């Protein structure tokens, strides 16, 4: 079933590229037409490249090797990296990126002095996980939040702790998810709005990859959402201290 889905997803952009290339050949004497259809080819190529990259990411996420490189990680550091990698996309939509820990807002781009202050105040929290794996999970959620949010809104990464767990929430003010789709969004190739996803280049694999990443690091992921009210995705991981006790 997975291979059938992959073949179908690859067939659409490759077929479009072939058809557009043929159209350009027929319209060689019309510069405006050539320019338009060349742009369409470029967009389909980007979509195809994105899909291939997502398939590679999915294969890595399913390798079950994430915990082999587990280490004690600063959650604020991981969140800052994930936000930084989405900064350009956020700025293009005039979306503000916010970071908080236990209800207190901190700087997204902190210098050495600010980091030292955070350390003195014991603001940071820690988990035991593979760095790249958990960063990929948070980065994908932030990317999705930006993608499905209107301009001039806010995307927040809120880190909090309970007695035995660390929670990383990615909160947006976007279009939300229909109740009927909530139970399916972590499935491979599932799209809430297929027409919109194809238009914007969505692969339908981002959340499936995110779930694998979180589970490989010993955590869970859940979602709260209402249409037109935004969404909140919550990653929950054991505290680093609890993981150390289990190891002992």
Image (tube, grey):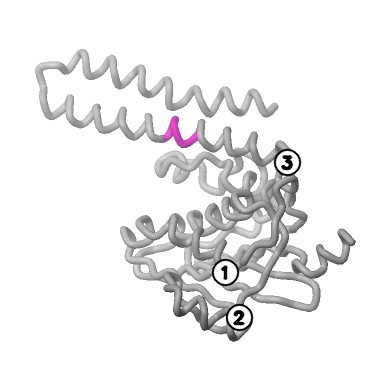
The magenta-colored residue range is 47-51
Report x, y in % for residue 223. 66, 62
Of residues 166 and 153, the one nearer the viewer is 166
Q: Which residue is mark 1?
A: 76
Q: Which residue is mark 2?
A: 123
Tell me whether the residue at label 2 lies in contact with that at label 1, contact meaning CB atoms closer than 8 angstroms: yes
**At 77% across and 65% down in the image, what residue appears?**
238
Q: In the rendered view, does 117 fall on the left or right side of 86?
A: right
Of residues 227 and 72, the one nearer the viewer is 72
Q: Is 15 covered by the magenta stretch? A: no
Q: Is residue 104 above or below residue 234?
A: below
Q: Residue 221's quadrant in the figure?
A: bottom right
Give me the C-alpha separation between circle 2 and circle 3.
30 Å
Q: Residue 247's quadrant in the figure?
A: bottom right
Are there few (<14), some (14-19), or many (20+) residues within 10 Å of tag 3? some
Tell me whether the residue at label 2 lies in contact with that at label 3, contact meaning CB atoms closer than 8 angstroms: no
- In which quadrant will I find the N terminus? top right
- Local SS, label 1: helix
Q: Residue 93's quadrant in the figure?
A: bottom left
- Local SS, label 3: loop
Give me the C-alpha separation between circle 2 and circle 1.
9 Å
Q: Which residue is mark 3?
A: 65
- In which quadrant will I find the C terminus? bottom right
């Amino acid at each position: 079933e997975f291979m059938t889905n992959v073949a179908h997803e690859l067939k659409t952009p490759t077929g479009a590229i072939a058809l557009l290339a043929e159209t350009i050949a027929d319209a060689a004497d019309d510069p405006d037409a050539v320019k338009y259809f060349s742009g369409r080819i470029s967009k389909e190529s980007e979509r195809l490249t994105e899909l291939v990259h997502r398939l590679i990411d999915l294969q890595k996420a399913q390798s079950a090797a994430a915990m082999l490189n587990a280490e004690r990680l600063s959650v604020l550091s991981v969140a800052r990296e994930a936000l930084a990698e989405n900064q350009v996309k956020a700025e293009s939509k005039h979306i503000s990126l916010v970071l908080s820990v236990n209800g207190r807002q901190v700087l997204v781009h902190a210098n050495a002095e600010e980091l030292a202050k955070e350390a003195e105040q014991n603001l940071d929290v820690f988990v035991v996980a593979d760095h790249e794996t958990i960063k990929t999970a948070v980065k994908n959620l932030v990317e999705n939040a930006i993608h499905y949010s209107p301009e001039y809104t806010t995307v927040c990464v809120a880190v909090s702790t309970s007695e035995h767990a660390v929670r990383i929430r990615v909160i947006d003010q976007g279009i939300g998810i229909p109740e009927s789709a909530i139970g399916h969004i972590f499935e491979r190739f599932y799209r809430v709005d297929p027409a919109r996803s194809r238009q914007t280049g969505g692969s339908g694999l981002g959340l499936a990859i995110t779930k694998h990443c979180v589970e490989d690091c010993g955590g869970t992921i859940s979602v709260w959402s209402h249409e037109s009210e935004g969404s909140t995705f919550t990653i929950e991981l054991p505290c680093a201290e609890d993981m150390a006790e289990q190891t002992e």
